[in-house]
Amino acid sequence: MHSCKVHSRSAVQVSAAEYDAQYKRVSSGLFSSALSKAQKQIMQKEHAWEKQLYQDEFTLPLSRNMFGLFTIPVYINHIRAVFVVDTGAQISGIKSERLAHFQMKKAPGSLQIGSIGGKMRDMQGLVADSMQMGALEIRNMAMIALDSSDFTLRFGNLDLFGFDGILGWDILHQLDFEMDDIAKQFLVVKNRFRLPYPNMIKGGFPCILAKRSDGGISLFGFDSGSRVSWIGESAVREHALQIVHEGSAMGFGVHGLEKMDLKIVKEWTLFVDKAEITLKDTMTGRVDLFEHFTFDGVFGNEIFKRRRIRIINSAGMVLLA
């Protein structure tokens, strides 16, 4: 059975030379401009929203639902909603069955989205006149419609998933924020520290530079909208990781639950900031999210279970202990 063990240790630093080498590897091509291109595709023109941050720091309640997804309260067109905090989603979205309730407008375009299992689907573009999250307000916000059949699991009249939409990396990459699974809080913070050794590259997906036991660097995405982590098959081959099983399983991603063929990797230990992360019996999954490089794996939200993770986008730093 899969497990993710995280232990605190002294900080592991990524040198400037190591960072520069990885930055050159990933920063060309679509990775750096993926978010703006996605918004342009939805709006069918260059898109600019209006951002208002009414105070530098604020706190929201953070809840974990029965599927291991973290949710926060937001307001769409001044109507309260519950959104999953999903760093793995390029663009924020709302369930199709809730569009009328939130007074959403259709955008002229759509966006093709790939899932954890490799399925591609066109998602209708939307526009929200206002999205408020604590002291942050975004006006004229491009979004996508999520197929409600993929994100609804009912028991009588109760939707067990219990959320209206997802808050994606399009919003989260603009913030310095913390997800605290101890105090159950989502915090937007103002960075007051000098962090000279960045370990994250900004782009269309959070890209963490994780150290391996051999001292090398592996590139890991971070998907807070996934409960579990996964490893790329190319990394399995490159690092001679042991496969203990082959089969299929159900995975949850942007297209809901889907069946995936996979392998199970016995064990891999990686280091991020002050955290030693050991993944055991971990599935393989899709890591070719951009055309010119592949991730070695993707961390799920299990890496900060009963812990805190701070994403300092302004300094390119992930803090985890």
Image (tube, helix red, strand yellow):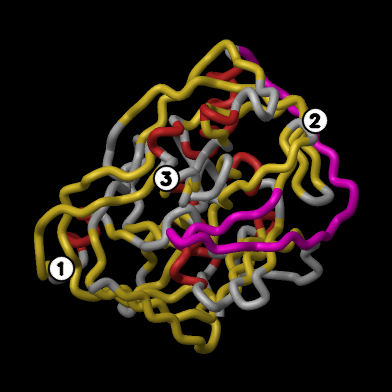
- Of labels 2 and 3, earlier in sequence is 2
Q: Which residue is pictured at 51% across the width and 60% down the height?
A: 65
Expressed as whole percent of the image width and height from the top left, the position of residue 208 reads 48, 60
Q: Which residue is pictured at 68% across the width and 29% down the height?
A: 102
For badge 2, the amino acid type reads Glu
Question: Residue under circle 2?
Answer: 50
Question: Residue under circle 1?
Answer: 240
Q: Is residue 215 visible?
A: no
Is there CB contact under 8 Å for labels 3 and 1?
A: no
Q: Which residue is pictured at 62% across the width and 77% down the height?
A: 182
Please tell me how crowded label 3 is: few (under 14), some (14-19), or many (20+) other residues with Cα within 10 Å: few
Q: Which residue is pictured at 69% across the width and 51% down the height?
A: 73
Determine the CA span between mark 2 and mark 3: 37 Å
Q: Nearer the viewer, mark 1 or mark 2?
A: 2
Please tell me how crowded label 1 is: few (under 14), some (14-19), or many (20+) other residues with Cα within 10 Å: few
For badge 3, the amino acid type reads Arg
Residues 76 and 14: in front is 76
Q: Which corner quadrant of the image does residue 108 belong to?
A: top right
Question: Residue under circle 3?
Answer: 154
Q: Nearer the viewer, mark 2 or mark 3?
A: 3
Which element type, helix, strand or loop, lies under badge 3?
strand
The span shown in magenta is 45-73
Expressed as whole percent of the image width and height from the top left, the position of residue 118 reads 28, 38
| Image quarter (top left, top right, bottom left or bottom right) of the C terminus | bottom right
